[in-house]
Amino acid sequence: MTRLNFLFLMVFVFSLLGSSKMKFMEDLAKGRLTILSEEQKKILTYCFGGQLKPGIDSKYTQSCYIHPLFSLDGLELTEDSPKDHFHHHGLFWTWPVVRTRGQDTGTWEPRIPSLRQHFVRWLKRKATDRTFVLGVENAWKLDEKEVVAKEKVYVRVHALEKQGRLIDLELEVEAVGGPLELQGTPEENKGYGGLTFRGSPMFTGATMTTEKGILAEDAVHTPFLWADLSTRELGVAIFVSPDHPGFPARWLIRNSYAGLINVSWPGLKPVTLKPGEPVILRYRIFIHRGDARTADVASAYERYLKERRVEDNPLSHP
């Protein structure tokens, strides 16, 4: 081998090594940041700017959520502003009842006065050999003016494993300038609100599974340890950290009009947040091939519990 050929070979090898880490692409014009896998496949897109589908009333403009969330083979697992619920948007965290400054409002869907999440700044965008951590600071603005809450979001994408990919999500919400009350919807005692996965049309009629087995019908405000939506080919599970307030959580799980998983916190009983006393909500998303049994979601959940109990490692820390 000549010296020149050797140099070309080394450049090629180093370029492969350099591409083995996860990376991100930022589209400032569209207000989106996409995390790419080790093989440079899309894993998820964080929508930090205002998003609005053509033909939809501007009051449904949303920001600060994840869409699309991709399968291991590049399929879009989430849906944004579907016709049946314009206010559903991918993997999001909003509340139908928020009381602040003596007024009733909410971030779940358009209200008067309005309350919506707005991007403030990036806190972290860091790749290691095995993970990518994204940190964001957002603000909740009342009537697009006054900040009534500060929100920090941390996403840790883990390296691909045999059974699938793990994504840890940490949400920190703190009241600003006075108390702020959160509550799930009291309508028909449903209690929904909080972290929500709105699946793409492929999850309509999908198999709904929890630690209690396969669900025969939609579950509303029902306590479970974990929840999974799967077709025969793929699935998504959500785990709740054992340090989550109100653990074990109650859930809204649906496959009737669409695939939907909601960790219903705080549910029907309101919770008051105070300045200087943030609430921290931690979850793990498990994207897998096959159904819940094939992917052994139950074992993946037990692993998560052990990891959370052994060491308290907030994603906000280095």
Image (cartoon, rainbow, N blue to C red):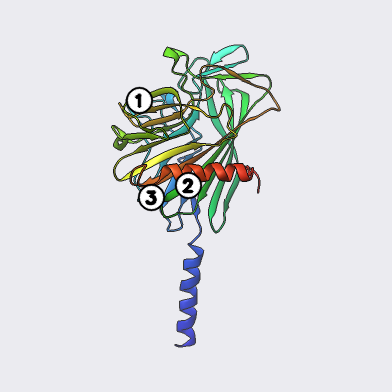
Q: Is residue 3 above or below residue 37?
A: below
Pointer 3 residue: 72
Q: Amino acid at mark 3?
A: Leu
Badge 2, how many Cα within 10 Å: few under 14, some, many 20+?
many
Q: Please state the horizontal and vertical placement of residue 21, each as a whole percent of the image.
A: 51, 59
Which is nearer the N-term, disc 1 or disc 2? 2
Q: Does the CB distance between marks 3 and 1 fall below 8 Å?
A: no
Per the image, the residue denoted by label 1 is 218
Q: Which mark is residue 108?
A: none
Binning the other alpha carbons within 10 Å of mark 3 as few (below 14), some (14 to 19) or many (20 upward) gives some
* Residue 250, x across and y down, in percent: 48, 25
Looking at the image, is mark 1 or mark 2 nearer the viewer? 1
Note whether residue 144 is visible. yes
**Residue type, mark 2 in image:** Leu
Of all residues, the one furthest to the bottom in this rendering is: 2
SS category of the residue bearing label 1: loop
Q: Residue at x 44, y 24 (%)?
A: 222
Q: Residue furthest front?
A: 212
Q: CA distance from mark 3 to mark 1?
A: 26 Å
- Residue 27 seen in the current view: no
Side of 10 where 289 appears, left or right: left
Name the element at disc 2: strand
Image coordinates of residue 216 in percent, x first then y, are 31, 28
First-in-chain label (3 vs 1): 3
Residue, disc 2? 166
Tag 3, which secondary structure? loop
Res 217 → quadrant:
top left
The residue under the point 63% across, 42% down is 314
Contact check, label 3 and label 2, Cβ < 8 Å: no
